[in-house]
Image: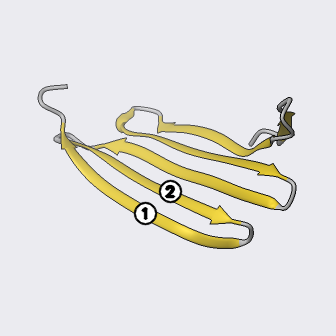
Amino acid sequence: MTDSYERLVEDGLKIRYSDSLDRFTIREGDPLSARVDSKRKIAPSRGDWRVAVGTRSSMAADRTHFHIIDTVEVFEGDERIFVENWDRRIPRDHL
């Protein structure tokens, strides 16, 4: 996981980046065990206004399909105002 950092834009907008993570795993001798997990969060703010968007994603595969799971969460202040989850199976089509 990376340390968070903040960027200040000339108009006073602060953008905080945190919770960045990319994890790649695979068991030796088992290519179908390959998996990637990622996490990101960005939090713009100006004065009393604060929002944040966080994402989590993972991808793996079996012999016939890629498996992708994604989540997006949106916060206004401390209140979660939106969440969406996706769970997809995509045919490998000879890949």
- Nearest the eye: 5 or 62: 5
Given residues 88 and 93, the one toward you in this image is 88
- Which amino acid type is marked by label 2? Val
Query: Mark 1 to mark 2: distance in Å?
Result: 5 Å
Tag 1: amino acid: Glu
Q: Residue furthest bottom?
A: 79
Left or right of 55 on screen, residue 19: right
Residue 72, label in figure: 2
Work out which residue is located at the far left of the displayed protein and give it: 93
Percent across and percent down for residue 52 are: 67, 55
Q: Quadrant of residue 77?
A: bottom right
Q: Sequence order check: which comes first, mark 1 or mark 2?
A: 2
Horizontal side of residue 53 vs 2, given as left or right: left
Residue 84 — which label? 1
Disc tally is 2
Residue 26's disc number? none
Please name the residue shown 48% across and 37% down the image. Answer: 26
Mark 2, Cα crowd under 10 Å, few <14 / some 14-19 / many 20+, is some
Image location of residue 55, percent across then percent down: 55, 51
Quadrant for the C terminus, please.
Answer: top left
Q: Residue at x 61, y 53 (%)?
A: 53
Provide residue 14's location: percent of width, then percent of height.
Answer: 83, 42
Q: Is residue 51 above or below residue 42?
A: below
Q: Nearer the viewer, residue 64 or 32?
A: 64
Which element is circle 1 on?
strand
The quarter holding residue 91 reads: top left
> Which element is circle 2 on?
strand
View extreme (front): residue: 11
Disc 1 packing (10 Å; few <14; some 14–19; many ≥20): few
Q: Is residue 1 above or below residue 92?
A: below
Instruction: Give the residue displayed 45% in from the left and 47% down from the top.
Output: 58
Whether tag 1 and tag 2 are in contact, CB under 8 A, the answer is yes
